[in-house]
Structures are given as structure tokens and as C-alpha cells.
Image (tube, rainbow, N blue to C red):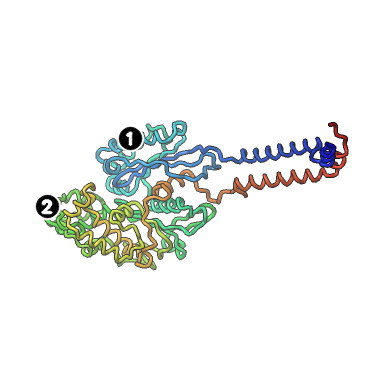
Amino acid sequence: MSAQREMKEKNPWHTPATIIITVIGVIAIVALVTVAVLQNKPLPKKYKYGIVLDAGSSHTALYIYGWPAEKVNDTGRVVQVHSCKVKGPGISSYASAPLNAGESLKVCMLEAKDQVPSKRHQETPLYLGATAGMRLLNIENSTASDGVFQAVSQALQTSPFSFQGARIISGQEEGAFGWVTVNYLDDRLKQGLETTGALDLGGASTQISFVSDNYDGSESPKNSVTFRLYGNDYNLYTHSFLCYGKDQVLRMTLAHQTQSGPATVLDPCFHRGYTAIKNYTVLYDTPCVSDRKPQPAPASFNHTGTGDFQECQRVVRNVFNFTDCKYSRCSFNGVFQPSLQGPFGAFSAYYFVMNFLNLTDTSTPLEDVKKKITNYCATPWEQIKEQYPHIKQKYLAEYCFSGTYIITLLTEGYNFTSENYPNIKFIKKIKDSDAGWTLGYMLNLTNMIPAEAPDKPPLPHGGYVSIVTIIAILLFVLIIFSLRPIWPRCSKRPQII
């Protein structure tokens, strides 16, 4: 018993003062670490939202985007949270009945109302951007174009969202914002990486946008757009070719084949066995070909397919002008284009056509791609219909033409070769968000991408907590050792047993 008493007297850790200091120190450490963890704990995310309607030539689509609301100056990561394809054709098709254009949007607007929390409705911006279909209608009949915009604006103003207006976006904007979308979603802008070019193909226009080291914008200023994003400057080459979307090019190729007003057209871009009666008035009812209608001509013609890729490519080449160029280099139709650089993302109709043809893998040699399209075009129409019974025949009949046009546009129009064709990646989505101009458009209008790189905390949350914990332990150890002078005095105090 006396031995145990002697050990207690010699051990300073058994003194009341040391025990109290130890307990207080432990409590202090726990409190310090707890405060650090709670203070820096990621909070449950609250989101803000934005809505963009893409009023294209063939259809309208609605996209809802969301981002963390607590980020300073709304610099949080923007993601697509919902999309809705409007039933029916594009709004430009309602020129003679504009009220129907507004009515067509209601189903998707109801979906948006359900997808966005009601407390966010009034603060959620809503935009409608119209592309080449409305550009053509505005050229052809500006009064009808204004009527359509008035109708869709009235319909959208009745929604609970903050409607910011409906307008035609320029071809340059469409190309530039598509480039922003692709590079933003791929985190290339924030990290200052080499950017990806954007290839967009719609029904009425097509866009090409990319950064080239040998292009400073001086040779063709109208094709230049400058961005300063996250502290980096980008001098972007971009051009939009109106009438060179796949639907309008199809009309141009048919217009070329019907210049003499024949009653029958043997078309190599359609399968053998395909036949349909086409109306001359409908074919030429677009500004892209309206001035070429043959006079006189019968009311209709028999459109018959022959299924020949090589001949189809020859017909498609007729819509391009490869000879006139006043610049150091051109793509086609006398339009300046610098040398291609870097990887490219090809989306919209590029993806859908090449995906149908099972040609999205660009590691396939270009010559093999052409052979596969050749074989597809040569397949009889009856066999094609049997292979794809669930696809509408109107769309099914055009894949031979569309595939031929895409390859011709890329290789002979934009000058991709067998060497750099693998640099193209056919994409539909990037990180669950659709590739296209709408996200870039909203980011620009809401100033969501800062010109300068946002400031970052010097340490991540985990690293911060770890350092605080280590420092707290070190401080506690130092305090204990600093009390060593009083240990002998404490140990000499008489103990009452």
C-alpha cells in the first residue's frame, strides 16, 4: 500500500492540477477541431436556375440549367438539369399561324414549372434564341417573323419565370457560344488548357469555330470574336454558313438537279427503289433556292433514287464554290478560314447522322468511312425499311444524302484530311449536358464566366482541418511541457489517503 502511495506521489500526472490542465486541454482540442469542421463543412446546396429555348429550323428544345446559389457572383459550376423537346416543327413554320407557335411551347413550359422549385420561379431567367430558320423567315418576310416573335413572347410572358425576351441570334453568336459550351463543359477554359473547336450542323445553317495560333483576326475581322475568360484571352475564328444546314442543302442539291424542270429526277443520294412525288412549289419555297425555280415547270416531279455515293458526292459538290478566294486560304464560297488546329467536337446533326450510320468512331480511317457510306447508299430501299422499321421513312430516306454531305463538308469544305480527321469527336453530350450554343448563350447573358480567374482558398477543406488539428495537438504538448517546473512541487504535496 505504501508502495502505491509512493508511486502516486512521484507521478506528476496524478496531481489535481495536472489532471485539470489535461482535461481542459483535451476539451480545447475537441472544441477547436469541432468548430473548424463545422465552420468549413460543405453546406447543403441550394440551386439557382436558368432556362433557354433553342428555336431551331426543324424543332424547338427547352434546356434548364442549375448552379450552386451560394457561390460568390454566381460562379458555381453550371449543369443541365432537364431538357424538353417541343412537339411539332420549328417556330418559323408557323409564319401563317403565329399563335400556334406560342401554343406549341406550353407543354415544355409546364415541365419547366415542375422542374424548377416554385420559390425560384420569379428569379429564374428565361431566354428564347432563334437560329437559322427564323433568320431565313426574316429575310423572306420580316412581318411574318415579327408576328411569330410577338406570339411566342406573349406565351412566355404568362409563365412564372423572368422572361428576358426572344430574339434571333446571329450565326456568329451561334458558333461562338457553341464553342464556349464545349470548352466550358470540358473544363478547358477554367484550367487554361488547349481549347476544342466546335462544329455545329443544324437544319438551315452550319458553324465552325476554333482557336488557331496563326490567326489574329486581321485578315478577316468579321470572322473574329475575342473572349477573356478566367484570366485567359481567346481570339476565336468563327463562321456560320446560312443555307448549309442539312435540310437546306438537300433542297439546293434537288434544285440543281431540277433546273430544267424535269418530270423525273434520278437522285444518286437516295436508295435504289425509293420513289416519291415532290412538289416544285414546296421545294423552292425557301430563300436558299427561291430564285432558282425553273420556268416553266410542272407542278411536281417524280423523285427516284439510284443509291450511288460517288455520284451523290458529285451532286453535293455543286452547292459549294471552291474556286473564288481573295484571302490566303479559304474554306468555300470565298470565306476565309485559317489552318485547322487542335481537337474538334462535332454535335447536333453531325452526331445524330453519324451515330445512325455507326460512324462516330473517328479512329476508323477516312477511306473506310467513305466505303461504309457507299455500301449504305447502295442498299436497296426495301431492305433499308426492313432494317429500320421504327424510323419515320421521311428521315430514313435522307441518311444517305446526309452522310455524304457531312463527309464532303468536312473534307472538301473545311479541309479535314485523313491525317486530322481523327481529331474530330462526334458528341451528343458532355458530362450529361447537351452540346450546343444554349449553355454558352446563358453563361454570357448572366455573366457567369468571370473575365478573371476567381480567387481560391489556399487550402482545401480537408487539408485545412488536418493542419488545425496538428497545430492544436502541438500546442497542447507544448503547454504540458511548459508546466514541467511545477511538476516536482505538485508531487511533494502530502496526499490524503
Looking at the image, residue 240 sits to the left or right of residue 492; the answer is left
Q: Residue at 78% x, 43% y: name it.
A: 480
* Residue depth check, mark 1 versus mark 2: number of the one nearer the observer: 1
**SS at mark 1?**
helix
Q: Quadrant of residue 426?
A: bottom left
**In which quarter of the view is residue 239 placed?**
bottom left
Q: Earlier in the sequence, mark 1 or mark 2?
A: 1
> In the image shown, does 280 or 342 lie closer to the viewer?
342
Residue 384 seen in render: yes
How far across and down, in percent of the image, does residue 44 sit? 53, 37
The secondary element bearing badge 2 is classed as loop
**Residue placed furthest toward the front:** 1
Local packing at callout 2 (Cα closer than 10 Å; few below 14, some 14-19, many 20+) is: few
The quarter of the displayed image where residue 374 is located: bottom left
Which residue in the structure is indicated by mark 2? Answer: 298
Q: Position of residue 345 (x, y in %)?
A: 39, 56
Q: How far apart are the two marked residues, 1 and 2, measured between alpha carbons? A: 41 Å
Tag 1 residue = 106
Badge 1: residue crowd in 10 Å (few <14, some 14–19, many ≥20) = some
Above-or-below relation of 397 to 33: below
Q: Which quadrant: the C terminus?
A: top right
Quick check: 273 left or right of 360? left
Determine the residue positioned at 30% across, 61% down.
407
Q: Position of residue 124 (x, y in %)?
A: 45, 37
Q: Nearer the viewer, residue 351 or 28?
A: 28
Question: Which mark is drawn over residue 45?
Answer: none
Q: Label 2 is placed on what type of residue?
A: Pro
Q: At label 1, which amino acid type do we have?
A: Lys
Observer-nearest residue: 401 or 240? 401
